[in-house]
């Protein structure tokens, strides 16, 4: 959804809508690049080190990463921020809140910024991107990238992914499409994208829904579709003033599972649980009984599926037990949305509306 006018920071978007970024002085678009760490910043001990590079404990800063790709100077005027420099297995909700606050601050205080590019580890990249998709308050592009091979390795994808990230963030075609990811020349929606392979370069997929477009070698940023679910500027979620979010856990269902893990999580004081159910969301009897007890104790229960595709629908049983369904959100994405929902309401019908809306 691309709209003329301005976002809430007062930035005129009219110049974005004609296929080129219209700047009165003919200057390159201004892009802020935020570094958070991940494989894209790690340096291994050899060019053949594809799996043990984290042991070297050597990280490139975002400025050092950009020095490797002088081509970005022809694309945009760059300003950098080093928010963190960690592997994304160590990224959690506290980092999401800080990153979202930084992105919003940049947009609010810099009316000439065309977009923001973010480097991130791939392990939790899809979660960070979706959190931003729900909490960034601007139509201007926010694009997240990472790498499957470190910059020290042969065949690294770090450099081209960083270039593509800046290109997409600077593109007028990316305005109003929500937070995006770009890796392997493919542009994906933060809501739909997921990591599907442990090592391959083409790991990020949107499964049956498909990616949005390409960042190709002819310097074109081309889109073929847009997300229709609510995001960014139209989202109701605000994170300013939050030090932490309500605790929500995921309970993974499997053949023969009981309610032990769910009961332990409830006893530990969780506020919500996402049931990563079998098939269409149903799970073994003991597991489902534990969910019912959790719901009766005040814990909000969201039913998702770990099949990877398809919706979870509100069946008669789910309705009778008072459960919320996740639509087609993955368990990880449903957890993020439930955390944000619980920061504003504990009314099940309202949370269900959000699951359908976002």
Image (tube, grey):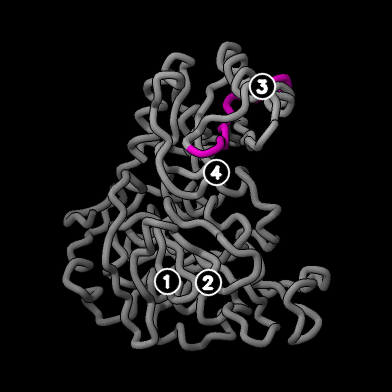
Question: Picture quarter containing residue 189?
Answer: bottom left
* Rendered location of residue 195, percent (x, y): 55, 59
Question: Regarding mark 2 in the picture, which secondary structure is present there?
Answer: loop
User: What numbered label is drawn on residue 1?
Assistant: none
Residue 245 place in picture, x, y as percent: 57, 34
Q: Residues within 10 Å of mark 3 (few under 14, many from 20)?
A: some
Q: Which residues are magenta?
A: 266-279
Q: How far apart are labels 3 and 1 at the CA level?
A: 42 Å
Residue furthest out toward the top: 296
Task: Indicate which disc, 3 or 2, sits on the residue closer to the N terminus.
Answer: 2
Between 6 and 327, which is closer to the camera in this rendering?
327
Report the Cα–Cα distance between label 1 and label 2.
9 Å
| Residue 186: mark | 1
In this rendering, would 49 be left or right of 96? Answer: right
**Quarter of the figure with the C terminus:** top left
**Number of the label disc, if any, that sits on residue 286:** 3
Residue 259 lies, in percent from the top left, at: 69, 24
Residue, disc 4? 306
Q: Pointer 1 and pointer 2: residues touching (CB < 8 Å)?
A: yes
- From the image, state whether disc 3 or disc 1 is nearer to you: 3
| Residue 202's disc number | 2
Q: Residue at x 50, y 44 (%)?
A: 330
Is residue 139 shown in magenta?
no
Q: Going from the N terminus, do you reach mark 3 or mark 1 first?
A: 1
């Amino acid at each position: 959804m691309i709209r003329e006018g301005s976002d809430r920071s007062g930035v005129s978007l009219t110049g974005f809508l004609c296929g080129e970024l219209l700047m009165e002085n003919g200057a390159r678009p201004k892009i802020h690049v935020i570094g958070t760490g991940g494989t894209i910043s790690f340096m291994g001990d050899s060019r053949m080190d594809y799996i043990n590079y984290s042991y070297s404990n050597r990280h490139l800063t975002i400025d050092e990463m950009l020095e490797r790709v002088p081509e970005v100077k022809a694309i945009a005027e760059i300003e950098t921020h080093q928010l963190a420099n960690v592997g994304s297995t160590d990224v959690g909700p506290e980092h999401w809140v800080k990153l979202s606050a930084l992105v919003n601050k940049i947009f609010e205080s810099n009316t000439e910024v065309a977009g923001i590019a973010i480097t991130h580890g791939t392990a939790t990249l899809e979660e960070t991107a979706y959190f931003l998709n729900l909490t960034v308050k601007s139509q201007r592009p926010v694009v997240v990238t990472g790498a499957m091979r470190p910059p020290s390795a042969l065949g690294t994808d770090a450099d081209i992914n960083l270039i593509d990230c800046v290109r997409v963030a600077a593109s007028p075609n990316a305005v109003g499409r929500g937070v995006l990811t770009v890796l392997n020349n493919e542009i994906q929606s933060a809501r739909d994208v997921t990591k599907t392979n442990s090592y391959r370069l083409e790991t990020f997929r949107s499964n049956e829904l498909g990616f949005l477009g390409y960042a190709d070698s002819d310097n074109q940023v081309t889109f073929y579709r847009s997300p229709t679910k609510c995001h960014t500027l139209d989202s109701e979620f605000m994170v300013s003033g939050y030090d932490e979010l309500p605790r929500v856990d995921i309970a993974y269902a499997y053949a023969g599972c009981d309610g032990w893990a769910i009961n332990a999580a409830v006893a530990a004081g969780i506020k919500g649980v996402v049931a990563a159910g079998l098939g269409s969301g149903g799970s073994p009897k003991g597991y489902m009984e534990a969910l019912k007890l959790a719901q009766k104790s005040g814990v909000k229960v969201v039913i998702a599926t770990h099949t990877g595709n398809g919706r979870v629908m509100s069946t008669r049983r789910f309705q009778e037990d008072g459960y919320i369904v996740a639509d087609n959100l993955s368990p990880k994405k449903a957890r993020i949305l439930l955390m944000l929902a619980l920061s504003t309401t504990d009314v099940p019908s309202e949370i269900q509306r959000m699951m359908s809306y976002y």
